[in-house]
Image: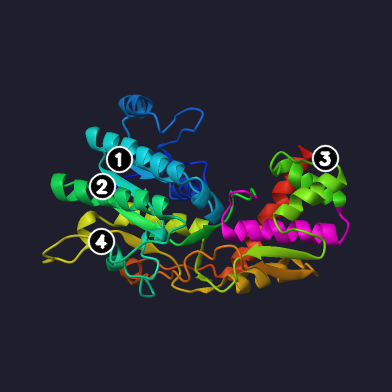
């Protein structure tokens, strides 16, 4: 089903890492009839607010990029928040999309839906074949429920809802807060702050934590207080200490490429394209989105050390969890549907570090 340039598209989560990139990608393709609401304007956890929004706006298509997300620490400590909030967002947005006759819906999940020990690379059909990774089990279950909702509405009611499962994402508008960010942006910030301490660039340290305070500590605190706070996160002038062993393998995809893949699927792929004709049981219709390439966390950290030119040491706190040992996506299905990635990890790290530094400069000047 083709969406013409006048199609009214609601992008839920349009301020987020992927949502903002999807918004920009649609704009670049000439789709100007876009609707977005910030959290302060529309609480997606509130069913009556979501119903009122759909009653008023009547979107033709929906991109559900809004989610409650975080890294290992957040997933481990706030398990109830991760399952409850994500289920609620999905229930409200997908439910109202169905009630309002939305023509096309794109749901964004995560590759953490796959079993902890899934055969590698992970094909779509390995979903639900064995147990999940403990640290992010509640989040994974919520995302599995979301993709199964899409699949079930398609099968029962003939809807056109498609789910895409991105690998680890990074890029512009990433979350760099030390308490709950994902692995790659967290490493960039930690290594950047360690470099500043190593080179005695206190003005740069204060600019950074004024922009993103750490547990209430900002640039107005004393040197001693700042050092003590950063030390809690493994940041010192001599070294950066990261969680785990550094051995887990990870795949990383530039967020603007995830957006391009998402829009490609939204515009060019229908539910009938996501499974094989003649399948007795239609399931696992979601689509992996990634590069199909992986490297260890240690290798990523070393690339960042080189990009930032930090002269200190890289250390590992092996008492902390590693998370899933390996989670490489099999992107055959995506390739067969006509999309391939272009940006490799070295270019991506360079771009993200440049974006991060620019953000500090702009915010400091304003």
Identified at 64% across, 48% down, the residue is: 177
Residue 31 visible in the current orientation: yes
Mark 3–mark 4 CB contact (< 8 Å): no
Report how far apart the C-alphas of labels 1 and 2 lie in the structure: 8 Å
Identified at 61% across, 70% down, the residue is: 300
Closer to us: mark 2 or mark 3?
3
Image quarter of the C terminus:
top right
Closer to us: mark 3 or mark 1?
3
As helix, strand or loop, the secondary structure at mark 4 comes to loop
Which residue is disc 3 drawn over?
A: 221
Residue 302 image position (x, y, % from top left): 67, 72
Report how far apart the C-alphas of labels 2 and 4 lie in the structure: 12 Å
Which residue is disc 4 drawn over?
A: 284
Which residue is disc 1 drawn over?
A: 94
Mark 1–mark 2 CB contact (< 8 Å): yes
Residue 285 image position (x, y, % from top left): 25, 59
Residue 22 magenta-highlighted? no
Give the vertical position of 293 relative to 243 (above or below): below
Identified at 39% across, 54% down, the residue is: 140
**Main SS category, magenta section:** helix
Q: Which residues are magenta?
A: 178-201
Tell me the quarter of the picture where residue 45 sits: top left
Residue 361 visible in the current orientation: no
Q: Which mark is residue 253?
A: none
As helix, strand or loop, the secondary structure at mark 1 comes to helix
As helix, strand or loop, the secondary structure at mark 3 comes to loop
């Amino acid at each position: 089903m083709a969406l013409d340039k006048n199609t009214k598209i609601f992008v839920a989560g349009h301020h987020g890492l992927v949502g903002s990139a999807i918004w920009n990608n649609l704009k670049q393709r000439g789709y100007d009839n876009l609707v977005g609401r910030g959290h302060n304007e529309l609480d997606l956890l509130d069913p009556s607010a979501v119903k009122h929004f759909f009653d008023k706006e009547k979107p033709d298509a929906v991109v559900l990029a809004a989610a409650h997300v975080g890294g290992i620490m957040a997933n481990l400590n706030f398990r109830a928040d991760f399952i409850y909030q994500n289920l609620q967002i999905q229930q409200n947005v997908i439910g109202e999309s169905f009630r309002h006759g939305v023509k096309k819906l794109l749901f964004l999940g995560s590759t953490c839906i796959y079993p902890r020990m899934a055969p590698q690379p992970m094909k779509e059909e390995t979903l639900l074949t064995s147990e999940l990774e403990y640290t992010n089990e509640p989040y994974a279950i919520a995302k599995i429920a979301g993709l199964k909702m899409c699949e079930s509405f398609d099968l029962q009611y003939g809807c056109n809802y498609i789910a895409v499962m991105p690998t680890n994402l990074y890029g512009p508008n990433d979350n760099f807060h030390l308490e709950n960010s994902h692995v790659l942006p967290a490493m960039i910030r930690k290594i950047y702050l360690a470099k500043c301490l190593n080179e005695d660039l206190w003005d740069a340290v204060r600019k950074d934590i004024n922009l993103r305070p750490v547990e209430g500590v900002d640039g107005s605190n004393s040197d001693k207080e700042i050092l003590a706070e950063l030390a809690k996160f493994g940041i010192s002038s001599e070294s950066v200490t990261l969680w785990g062993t550094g051995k887990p393998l990870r795949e990383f995809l530039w967020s603007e490429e995830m957006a391009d893949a998402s829009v490609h699927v939204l515009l060019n792929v229908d539910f009938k394209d996501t499974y094989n004709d003649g399948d007795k049981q239609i399931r696992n219709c979601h689509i992996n989105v990634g590069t199909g390439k992986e490297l260890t966390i240690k290798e990523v950290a070393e690339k960042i050390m080189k990009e930032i030119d930090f002269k200190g040491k890289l250390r590992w706190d092996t008492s902390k969890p590693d998370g899933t040992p390996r989670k490489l996506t099999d992107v055959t299905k995506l390739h067969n549907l006509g999309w391939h990635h272009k940006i490799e990890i070295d270019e991506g790290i360079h771009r993200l570090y440049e974006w991060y530094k620019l953000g500090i400069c702009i915010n400091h000047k304003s």
